[in-house]
Amino acid sequence: EEEEEVPLKPQLIPQGSGGSGVLMGPDTQKGMPTCLLCTCLGGSVYCDDLRLDSVPPLPKDTTHFYARYNRITKIHKSDFANMGKLKRIDLTANEITSIDEKAFIGLPELEELVIRENHISQLPALPETMTLIDASHNNIGSKGIHREAFKDMTALQFLYMTDNNIDYIPVPLPDSLRSLHLQRNNIQMMLEDTFCNLKDFNYIRNALEDIRLDGNPINLSRTPQAYVCLPRIPIGTLV
């Protein structure tokens, strides 16, 4: 399985370092500015591996927020309120069990959400601006995805839901999608119009070149017409 590249974790800026605006930020519960506890580089805030149990208050101009390998258990609606410039949130490998339904929906610039390796059972509503969603290695299950959750995300390119307990492909999927990873779930069947338009045989879904269904109890050879519009047959069991 191909994994997304994770940037190297920068070193913490020690308390008392010199500098100007980049070291100023809201106070955290630990009594020091967020940009002293974490590392702030331009609009990026790195709070990796700091034993945080909640999202710290972020500078309003934050564009990229990384809080990987912490102990965060819940994402509240207030955690990202009024963060109008936020483009990427990466909460890989925390202990998140729940996310408030509207925690991300008010973020007008949000494009990338990485919440892999947590204990999430419900994928919250997301803005239509998304380009990448990685919710692999969670407990999302069949009822954990809103109906037609991705339909209006016309810029969505990467959707990773590996190793959950999903028993269906979450259609409809936008034409922009390039990569769909659903391996090691419980998908047992596919319809012939899951990816293609049986009423329009001229319809070609050129972008979707990477579909992973390996590790599911589905026999892809049972629906040969389901792939006629795709550049490549999905990876999975063919016998």
Image (cartoon, grey):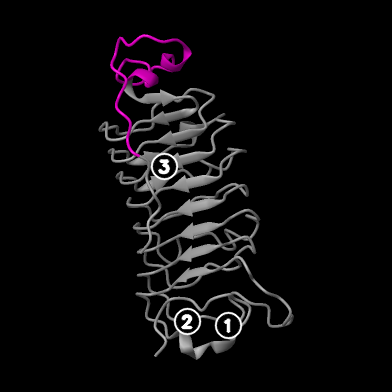
Residue 107 percent location from the top left of the image:
58, 38
Above or below, 205 relative to 40: below
Q: Residue drawn at (39%, 90%), measured in percent from left and top?
A: 239
The label nearer to you, 1 versus 2, is 1
Labelled disc at residue 124:
none
- Amino acid type of disc 3? Asp
- Amino acid type of disc 2? Met
Labelled disc at residue 226:
1
Above or below, 131 relative to 192: above
The label nearer to you, 3 versus 2, is 3
**The magenta stretch spans which residues?**
8-36
Q: Secondary structure at mark 2?
A: loop
Estimate how packed mark 1 is, as few (under 14), some (14 to 19) or many (20 or more) residues with alpha carbons within 10 Å. many
In space, the residues marked 1 and 2 are separated at their CA atoms by: 11 Å
Tell me whether the residue at label 3 lies in contact with that at label 2, contact meaning CB atoms closer than 8 angstroms: no
Q: Which residue is mark 2?
A: 189
Residue 62 percent location from the top left of the image:
50, 28
Q: Which quadrant would residue 219 be assigned to in this image?
A: bottom left
Q: Earlier in the sequence, mark 1 or mark 2?
A: 2
Q: Which quadrant would residue 172 be assigned to in this image?
A: bottom right
Estimate how packed mark 2 is, as few (under 14), some (14 to 19) or many (20 or more) residues with alpha carbons within 10 Å. some
Q: Earlier in the sequence, mark 3 or mark 2?
A: 3
Q: Nearer the viewer, residue 212 or 101?
A: 212
- Amino acid type of disc 1? Ala
In space, the residues marked 3 and 2 are separated at their CA atoms by: 32 Å
Q: Which quadrant would residue 86 be assigned to in this image?
A: top right
Q: Secondary structure at mark 1?
A: helix
Q: Which residue is mark 3?
A: 90
Q: Residue drawn at (55%, 88%), measured in percent from left and top?
A: 224
In space, the residues marked 3 and 1 are separated at their CA atoms by: 34 Å
- From the image, give the main secondary structure of the stretch colored magenta: loop
Estimate how packed mark 3 is, as few (under 14), some (14 to 19) or many (20 or more) residues with alpha carbons within 10 Å. some
